[in-house]
Structures are given as structure tokens and as C-alpha cells.
Amino acid sequence: MRADTGSGWEAVFVDPVGQVVQQRWADAALAVAFEELEPVSAFPVVPGRRWGPGQWWSATTGRHVACGSAAMRAQLMVLDRDPEVVGLAGRPVRLLWREGRGQVRSWVPQLFARYRDGAALLADCPSHPEAGGERAQRAAVVLEAACAQAGWSYLRLEPLEKTLAANLKWLAGYRHPRNAGRPHLAAAVHEAFAQPRPLIEGAETVGDPIEVLPAVFHALWHGHLAAPLDVPLNERVLVSPGADGANGHGGTGGPGSRDGR
């Protein structure tokens, strides 16, 4: 397949007042805050599938993000923990282009992420490498070129390893600010893990684990504390000070980063 030039790419999106807009991709990529937009089309409902479309509450933005699959939710968890990510949206743009013989093609990437430096990521979240078939692979070639022109990235993000996904899902349950606890509790939690120690030991030095553990898990989610997430979380896992902005992944790189595939 021959990808069209940048002058041939078009973006379709729903603007903040609900109007469908189509404009040159180069102009839209420069001017449109896609992280603020609603989906340009709904996620499909597949009969028989155990997990259907829903909403992900983002700790980064404080808003809900449309989510179409369990695989996408897992990638949202990774991106929502990334301190460099400042905006997230589900399916905010459709890309149109013409193939070599003039046929109009289109693709709606599942996920958009805006980074602190202004760059962005468009991504799809396949449940396995062959998902979407040849059409998805052909679209990926075009999307990579279009994003490169804009100084962005396009990725087909690899599914998370099961243990990492399970750990992130657990910590995500404590991502809301209400789990940080009272100010003195958050400070005591950080002090308890000033040196690496088992999770339960540090929690018990602060107080009743029933009250303290939600604050510990909240701090782990936000990268204020760190623990290895490639092994199952348990009461003996070693918890240590986090990087607090230098690397908010709590000890994991995660495939949702700009360079991950």
C-alpha cells in the first residue's frame, strides 16, 4: 500500500459544541486539543464478548475516558500513571486518506494521550498481535506516517503481562484522591517507607492497616512509593520511596510509554 502525502490526510472529529468537523490533518494536529474531545464514534459492542465498552476515570485529568476493551483499559492504567501524560481521550479522531488507486480509507485509533511537552500518542490496544487483521496492519502504516509528520507517535501497544496487569488493576482501585487519607497519614506513610521494607511492616508502624493500606496503595499508584510490579503484590513485597515525577511507574517501564510496542 502506498500511503498518501500529508496534504491528502484528513481528520474528522466532534468539536466541543458537538459539531462534526473535517479538516486537513496537518492543521488539526497542530490546533485541536483532542484530549478534550468526545469519541468521534462509539466503541462497538461485540455480542458474546465478556467485556464491553465503558468509562475509565482518569486520575490524571479527573474526567472519564471512553474505553472499548479490557486491553485498552490496561493501557489506560499505564498511561494514567505516567507523570509525563497530561491528557487522555478515547477515539477522538478519525483519519481519512486515499490509497494508491484512489479508494478512500479510514481508521479511528482507540486511544489518544497528550504529553507534557505538547507531543501526543495515538494508539490501538489489540488483545493480541494479529488483532484487526490486514486492515489494521495497513492502517498502522498510514497512521505512523501521519503522526510522524505531526511530531507525534502511533503505536499498536502490546498487551500487558498478566501479573503487571493484575497489579495495576489492584492499585487503580485506590487512584482516587479520597484514598490518600488525611494529610498527617500521607506524611506518616511516606516516612514509614523512607527505607525499603515489607508492605505490611511499614503499614503497621503507621497504624491500623485497614486505614493505612489504602493510603499506601494510593501512593504506589501515583509513584510516591515504589514496589516491583512484575511479581504479585502481597504483604511481604518490598516497598521503597518512589521517584516522585522522575519515573512514576513504581518500578516498571510499562508498554504504554511512547517507545513501547
Image: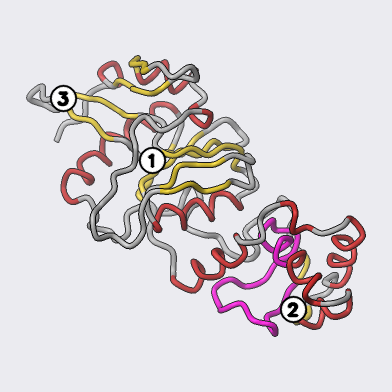
- The amino acid type of the residue labelled 3 equals Val
Helix, strand or loop at label 1? It is strand
Based on the displayed image, in which of its 4 quarters is residue 47 positioned? bottom left
- The amino acid type of the residue labelled 2 equals Leu
Outermost residue on the right side: it is 184
Q: CA distance from mark 3 to mark 2?
A: 56 Å
Nearest to N terminus: mark 1 or mark 2: 1
Is residue 202 depicted above or below 147 in this figure?
A: below
Based on the displayed image, in which of its 4 quarters is residue 107 positioned? top left
> Badge 2, how many Cα within 10 Å: few under 14, some, many 20+?
many
Q: Which residue is mark 1?
A: 154
Helix, strand or loop at label 2? It is helix
Nearest to N terminus: mark 1 or mark 3: 3
Colour pattern of the rendering: secondary structure
225 in magenta: yes
Q: Nearer the viewer, mark 1 or mark 3?
A: 3
Residue 12 percent across, percent down from the top left: 34, 22
Dot label at residue 104: 3
> Badges 1 and 2: C-beta atoms under 8 Å apart?
no
Q: Which residues are magenta?
A: 217-239
Q: Which residue is mark 2?
A: 199
Residue 114 percent across, percent down from the top left: 54, 36
Is residue 16 depicted above or below 56 in this figure?
A: above
